Amino acid sequence: MRAYLDWNATTPMHASVREAMSEASREAWGNPSSVHAEGRAARRWVERAREAVATLTGKDARDVLFTSGGTEANNLAIVSAMERPGKLLVSRVEHPSVTRVAERCERDGRVRWLRVLPSGAIDLDDLRAALDEGAASPLESEKVSTLAVCAVSAEMGILQPLDTAIGLAQARGVWVHVDAVQAFGRVQSASILARRADTASLAAHKMRGPKGIGALAALPGARIVPVIVGGAQERGLRPGTVDAVACAGLFAAVSRADDSAAAYARLAPLRDRLEAALIEMGAERNGDASMRAPHIASLAFPGFSGPELVAALDLEGVAVSAGPACSAGTMEPSKSLTTLYGEDRARRTIRLSLGEETTSAEIDFALSVFREVLQRSART
């Protein structure tokens, strides 16, 4: 038996997604930019996916751009927003696809890092102060132009205070980008709030869809600046041949987002049982338990480094992670956890994330494996 508890990294494709992609691969293999029948057949899947994403994100279909995933969508949004003069407000709890772009902007003095509370949420008082500082400055370069905030933090699952943050920023005319990759299809309340952002990102493979496709959805009038240049696909804002088969998978995944979110909402008792048992074994919880998505637990274990524990569990049949999959293989501990708890605890942390197919039997099996691995370590 194996227990897959790494749904934040990626999800198994849903049967409806596989079926849609199989149909499209047979009937829509043409280039969707071509005007002949084969191209038109492919184009139909592309536009079906675009309409579905528009409905999910509360945007107009004309303002939905397909990308290779959430990372590209986040990069595209922030690079575009920072074409305007002014500063970017961002915190260290963001995904690396946001913080790494911010670090580039920081070289020009264009970033104001927001404080993060021990709960794992951004400090709204600091956000207010940053907005006031920008508004009071006579220099255009010192004004705030952009706020980037995730809907659900990938590592600890903290639900960020989007309602207040978006309201404060947009009242000042500040462009808001929400990384909603971990929200759409998982946390309905966060998804609804993310729709208010100027731009929002998603990735199909976090929603039981295929890897290699995501989207950036924008409000009308949002100016997007391409980071790739070439053809006229996606209005020239994201050139390159659009994969109609991947779009079919995205369409199917997005079409079941409400059902998926409802399934995630029922996971809290399973997650809580798993977490409580692991805390009894000596683990320490990261983040505020009252502010989390229902399927995520971030725990630090004494006597282990995160990667060591991940490897030991995997050998016994339990899949977890030491943080975002995009950071796998790096020697640096999580910057967000280091900011909150220090480097030692960050290095000892693993993330467990359940999904809509996680069963009670998997949790029982995972707990038995944890007991064996931790006891074995104590004996050596």
Image (cartoon, rainbow, N blue to C red):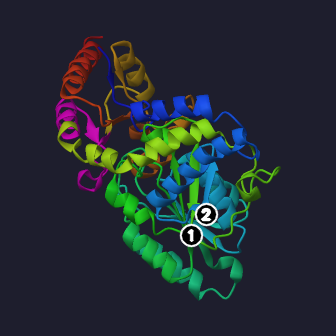
Circle 2 sits in a helix, a strand or a loop, which is it?
A: helix
Judge whether residue 283 is colored magenta. yes
Based on the displayed image, in which of its 4 quarters is residue 211 positioned?
A: top right
Q: Nearer the viewer, residue 74 or 99?
A: 74
Circle 1 residue = 219
What residue is at 75 percent from the left and 53 percent from the top?
Answer: 227
Indicate left or right for 328 with 223 as reference: left
What residue is at 60 percent from the left and 76 percent from the top?
Answer: 144
Q: Say whether disc 1 or disc 2 marks the residue closer to the N-terminus.
A: 2
Circle 1 sits in a helix, a strand or a loop, which is it?
A: loop
Q: Position of residue 327 (x, y in %)?
A: 54, 36
Check the image and report above or below for 363 versus 220. Answer: above
Q: Is residue 334 visible?
A: no
Check the image and report above or below for 311 versus 189. Answer: above
Disc number for residue 63: 2
Q: Work out which quarter of the rendered image holds the N terminus and state it.
A: top left
